[in-house]
Image (spheres, rainbow, N blue to C red):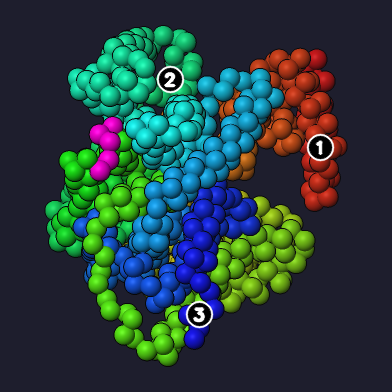
Amino acid sequence: MLLKYISEKVLVKIISFLTLILALSPGIYLNAVIYPYVTAKTILFRVFVSLMLFLYIWLILKNKKYLPSKNNLLISFFLFIVACFFSGIFSPDPAQSFWSTPERMMGTFNLIHFFLFVLIISSVIKSKEAWIKLIHWWNILIVSTGSIALYTFVTRHIANQTSIFSDRFYGFAGNPIFFAALILIFFYLNLHLFFEKLQKQQKGLWWHVLIAIIYILFIALTGSRGAFLALGVTGLIFLISLVFNPNNELNYLLRINVQKISLIVLISLLTVFSVVFVFKNNDFIKNNYILHRLTSMNLKDGSSFSRIIVSKIGIDCFLQKPFLGYGFDNFEICYQNNFDNMMVEVLPRENRFDKAHNMPIEILATTGIIGFVFFACIYVFGYKNIRDLMIENKIDFYAGLSLILGIAAYFIQNIFVFDVFEGFIGFCLLLAYIIFLSNSKKINLDLEKIPSKIKDFVLILSLILIGLSIYWFNLYIFYYDNMVKRIDHLVSNDKAETALNDIKNLHLIRSPHKDALYFGFFDIFVKNQKNMSKAQLEEYYDIAFKNQQFSYKKYPHRTHIYLVQLAHIASKAVNPEIKIQPKDVKNATEIVNLTKKYNINQPELDFFYTQILFNSDNEKDWVLGEEIIRKAIKTYPESAKFYWVYGVNLIDNLHRPEEGIKNLIKSYEKEIVFESIDQVMTTVINFNKYNEPDYAIKVLQIYIPGNPKRFQLFMELSRAYILKNDFDNAKKALDQAKKVYEEERFTKYSSEIEKKLKELEIELNNLN
């Protein structure tokens, strides 16, 4: 009886509407969670797909014509998920393989939802007109939200009086690569619809040309080399096809000589790109960030060369576990086990990779040959479906070629990056559309013979199970992903005790994302530690360590847990009122020993560990710290961080200031990027103290523009100019320090600060 309450037509309309609403998902941003550009959109997608699944079950119980097709593309996608699931089951970290990390959220659980999305819309949306309307509305939402993002991008550059080509356009995805991945798919979908409408002489075909041009502009502004190369290669194939495959019907429909126009466009584009590459060392191109980025794809570029190293690591991982790999979405485990020290030389600032940045190789490394075969079949059968339609004249040649090139473009782009939500949802929409076009035979189940009471039971059971899934696997996770903001609010409003009680119970939470929350807590407590009591801070550190200790014993292969733990302990050195205690050294040593046991080779682990050892009161720890850091500098000679921490501790603890200053200078020369203003202050204070004011000024000139409210920076700048006997600049810096101090007056340490300002003023007067 329940089946009769909603008609078949209404169910189809609701599913179609939910599919349309999902066009907004790539642009969703929510600052209330730790990963604003990832969490909310993924949770929304999963909830909507779950609702669509319930409605779809209802629909097929009413009419078996909505059962999925036996299309090889759909079957390949399903078998790929099965391979991913079993690779995860037999992996070192099955939980991460299934749930992924909150930073990515592209594990097997999400793949299941993408598969359901493809299955449902390819089975429910049954008319060409409905598909065109759906793509039309997705276009409107993507172009409108993208245009708003572009307007914000342009106005920001106008306000800052900078060129729009001095920066990359991020679109609405928080990352230019992610935005470009989605746009690439829709560029070819619009090209396909243009040729479809052209053949039938339908209205609105030039609308798709306009949209395609807008998408090309978006891709160019992102400066995404993978997307640009994918567009270039597939676009070249398309133009060559127009030139060497004359089509009189196309000439007639467009009222132009398509072959000649295409040849002119092809020669013009090749000429322009050749000129740009020939003159890539010209000042105009070098000063244009986007052009310079697009012309700098070579092995000398650290970003490009690092991809080759990571790809080699991926191949090594495949050879080690050729059948099931290291587990889907567990690439970081194999990366750490096969870490190449050259990564630090190529990318000294950021050398931790949780993705291979080459999707075919990542699939080989994480799911083995079994997963890779089904992964490849998705692309092969996608191509075969369209080719069959073209052979049978069920689709125009150029309309079909556009879809094939859309698949090819996505594959080429993913040789340089990896699957992300924004690009993959567009790719899934394309796959669903191809499955619809191929009109394969449906699965044949005789549902009419099932009694209505059994159908009602199935429907109610589906509602209960899907409802529980929405709550436990989506809403529950989302609620606790918001915990960082709640803790920040409590600590900022002097309610640290309440915050500590909440964190104390964090180990009881069943969210797969709870380990990542400590990234946020770490920032909160370090930021606010000067406004908290010593007892509260010590309590937080103890709670954080105990909870995280439980996590890394349960998930011993997760690099980020060890990093956060060591960073927590090392952060004690930032606050002069808190000291590194013997138990902290013991805890840090336990962590480091575990990383060695599980073959985790991240250089930052040594960086944090040596900071902890050098800030201990035990001289034996200093000796061990120096031994470790000397070895680290020898192993990673291009890592500026190690020179910096060694230099600071040679001055502060080992009492060898001359050697220490030399290491600080080396860290500057190797372009160190400081992670906090405290590190900047430590550096410039030592440069001034040991008569290296030139380096102090250079460092301050880099960091003052981004921190104009830090009066301490202006104080040190004034002191550096005093050391250089530069009265005018010293006075300007001191005046600015006083001005900022008055505006941002601190209640704590105010008398000490005012004393230092007075001392600077006396030094300045003496200089005058």
Is 717 located above or below residue 377 in the figure? above
Q: Residue at x 56, y 70 (%)?
A: 475
On-image quarter of the C terminus: top right
| Residue type, numbered disc 3 | Lys
Between tags 2 and 3, which lies in front? 3
* Coordinates of residue 350 in the picture (x, y in percent): 41, 41
| Residue type, numbered disc 2 | Leu
* Coordinates of residue 297 in the picture (x, y in percent): 32, 25
Q: Residue at x 24, y 58 (%)?
A: 440
| 556 within the magenta span | no
Distance (Cα) linking label 2 and label 3:
60 Å
Image position of 363 (left or right of 282)? left
| Residue type, numbered disc 1 | Tyr
Tag 3 secondary structure: helix
How many residues crowd around disc 3 within 10 Å: few (fewer than 14), some, or many (20 or more)? Answer: few
Is 339 located above or below residue 454 in the figure? above
The label shown at residue 4 is 3
Residue that badge 1 annotates? 741
- Which quadrant of the view contains residue 304? top left
Residue that badge 2 annotates? 291
Q: Which residues are magenta?
A: 394-398
